[in-house]
Image (cartoon, rainbow, N blue to C red):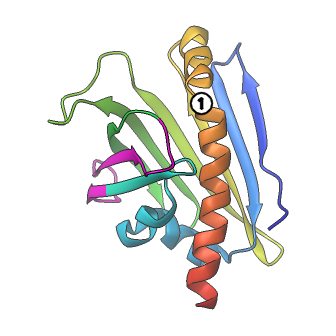
Amino acid sequence: MGRTTIVKKDREQRKLTVERIVTIPLKLSWQGWTKPEHIERWWGPRNWNATVYEMDVRPGGVWRYRLAPDKAGEGEEAFCKATYSEVMELSRLVYTDTFTDPNWNPVAGSDMLTSVTFEEAGEGTRLCIITHFASAEELEAAEGMGMVEGYTDTLERFENEISLYITG
C-alpha cells in the first residue's frame, strides 16, 4: 500500500521500536490484534503461517501460537507463549513473549517484554511495537535472526489482510 514501516534500535535501552501508520480504522486495528481468526491471517513474516492455540486477551491471559514457514518460506517452526500484563481496549497491549518448546515449556532467557500501542491517525491507525530485551546482546541476536524484517513484513501483512477483510 506504499506505506513505510519505521524501525529504531536503541542498544542503550535494549529496545526495538517498529512503527507504521495503517489505513485501517482504530477499532478494526484493535480487533485485528486481539481476535485469533484475524491474527492467524497476518502474524509473522512473509511466507510464514501462524496457528493460534489459545488467545485470552486480558491481564494474566495467555496467547499460545506457532509460526511455521509455508512452502516458499525458510526456517524452523517456532512455538511461543505470550502472557498479557496490560490490556487497555483500543489503546495498548503489553505482554511478555517467550519462545517455548512444542510442549509449551519456556526456553530460558527468551523473554521479550512487548508493548503495542494503537492511536488514531487521520483515517487510519498508528501502530507502535516496542520490544525490550534483557541485554544489548539479546537485541543484537534478535536482529541477527531476522526480527526487524519479520516485524516489517508482519505490519505490511496486517495492513493488507485486514484491509481485504474490510473491503471484502
> Is 28 situated left or right of 101 in this image?
right
Residue 142 vertical placement versus 24 (above, below): above
- Which image quadrant for residue 141? top right
Residue at 59 percent across and 52 percent down: it is: 154
> Is 153 situated left or right of 107 in this image?
right
Residue type pointed to by label 1 = Gly
> Is 94 situated left or right of 82 in this image?
right
* Residue that protrudes farthest toward the left in the picture: 103
Question: Residue 43: where, in percent of width, then height?
Answer: 49, 55
Report if residue 141 lies within the magenta region: no
Question: Residue 66: where, in percent of width, then height?
Answer: 32, 46
Q: Which residues are magenta?
A: 52-74
Foreground of the two, 88 or 167: 167
- Which image quadrant for residue 13? top right
Foreground of the two, 103 or 81: 103
Residue 102 vertical placement versus 10 (above, below): below
Question: Residue 86: where, in percent of width, then height?
Answer: 43, 49
The residue where tag 1 is placed is 146
Residue 11 vertical placement versus 7 (above, below): above
Disc 1 packing (10 Å; few <14; some 14–19; many ≥20)? few
Identify the element where label 1 is drawn: loop
Could you tell me which quadrant the N terminus lies in?
Answer: bottom right
Question: Residue 49: where, in percent of width, then height?
Answer: 42, 54
Residue at 60 percent across and 63 percent down: it is: 158
Q: Could you tell me if residue 89 is visible in this image?
A: no
